[in-house]
Amino acid sequence: MDPPFNEIYNNLLYNQITKKDNDVSEIPFSFSVTAVVEEVELPVIDVSRLIDGAEEEREKCKEAIARASREWGFFQVINHGISMDVLEKMRQEQIRVFREPFDKKSKSEKFSAGSYRWGTPSATSIRQLSWSEAFHVPMTDISDNKDFTTLSSTMEKFASESEALAYMLAEVLAEKAGQKSSFFKENCVRNTCYLRMNRYPPCPKPSEVYGLMPHTDSDFLTILYQDQVGGLQLIKDNRWIAVKPNPKALIINIGDLFQAWSNGMYKSVEHRVMTNPKVERFSTAYFMCPSYDAVIECSSDRPAYRNFSFREFRQQVQEDVKKFGFKVGLPRFLNHVY
């Protein structure tokens, strides 16, 4: 069932081989910080107020969403419109597909080629290794799937309801940033977004190996449904904090594109997943992405970032990961004119 982590990454796990590159002045701050001070509950926002509340309640809810996006880059939503029945079915189907033998998963024809991923092919040191496996599925794979299995129908429900929630949140954030809220329905259409099912197997070296190495998300926003095992951590006030699981909530986090589009108003925050020595962890994420040709423009007379297309951003991220072993991200696109 598990990918062959020990066989493939034996040298990294037990010989601590490291690679130095003169083109990188220093290892990112997040890779050198291991201590977690405390477990916290992220801001919790009842988004049913956006639909059912009076005008004053709607405005309070909108401001809470914007404030959390400015100050945390992460928040939780309850009464979000995705039923517990859909979420529980999603979890059950996800467990079932990951229980299949590794050879079957790695050659799976359920989704397009390359959807199944595990480990970190580019890892040259133990800190770059991610002890996890995933199905990273384009939304078109779900919509176009004529094989109406329980898995595909459950993914379709989860994806459709996540899409509606993402549009609602993005439009609120656009409004609070003084931006055109129709941008997302025009640019982040069904066939440009992704669903990712994650599994984090038990790890023999939980204090040294990440489940998912520190990173920011290369999208506008992410909707995450996770189990109650825990392991998600994020940086707040220059320190790592652990996110306390909430069984009734979905986690929302701001991606790089929203940070650039809002001229830094909303924060794309670095986060990671820690491994567990005994218990596996599951999560499902919806990524709100634009088309590759969509241009991300700062909403300011003094833009912090230059204009760039999503294609350009993705290509730069891939080049940096290949060269350095980690993503550089938005600093590559800073506007040096100002």
Image (cartoon, rainbow, N blue to C red):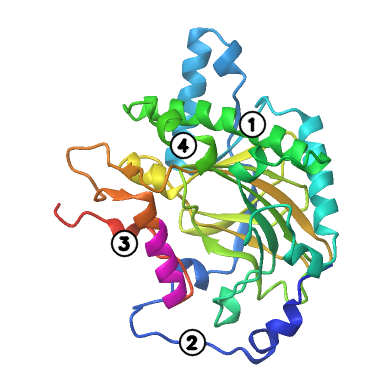
Q: Earlier in the sequence, mark 3 or mark 1?
A: 1
* Residue 140 picture quarter: top right
Crowd tier of the residue under label 1, counting other residues whose Cα lies within 10 Å: few below 14, some 14–19, many 20 or above: some
Q: Secondary structure at mark 4?
A: loop
Per the rendered image, the range of residues in magenta is 314-323
Residue that sits furthest to the top in the current view: 54
> Residue placed at 76% from the left, 37% from the top?
154
Q: Position of residue 152 (x, y in %)?
A: 75, 41
Q: Secondary structure at mark 3?
A: helix
Residue 211 is inside the magenta segment: no
Crowd tier of the residue under label 3, counting other residues whose Cα lies within 10 Å: few below 14, some 14–19, many 20 or above: few
Q: Secondary structure at mark 1?
A: helix
State whether residue 190 is above or below residue 268.
above
Amino acid under label 2? Answer: Lys
Q: Earlier in the sequence, mark 1 or mark 2?
A: 2
Q: Position of residue 246 (x, y in %)?
A: 72, 40
Residue of label 1: 160
Amino acid under label 1? Answer: Ser
Q: Label the magenta part by its dominant secondary structure.
A: helix
Residue of label 2: 19
Spatial CA span between label 4 and label 2: 38 Å
Compare residues 24 and 321 and report the one nearer the observer: 321
Residue of label 4: 188
Residue 322 is inside the magenta segment: yes
> Residue placed at 75% from the left, 81% from the top?
6
Compare residues 329 and 230 and report the one nearer the observer: 329
Label at residue 332: 3
Crowd tier of the residue under label 4, counting other residues whose Cα lies within 10 Å: few below 14, some 14–19, many 20 or above: many
Amino acid under label 3? Answer: Arg
The residue mark sitting in front, 3 or 4, is 4
Q: Secondary structure at mark 2?
A: loop
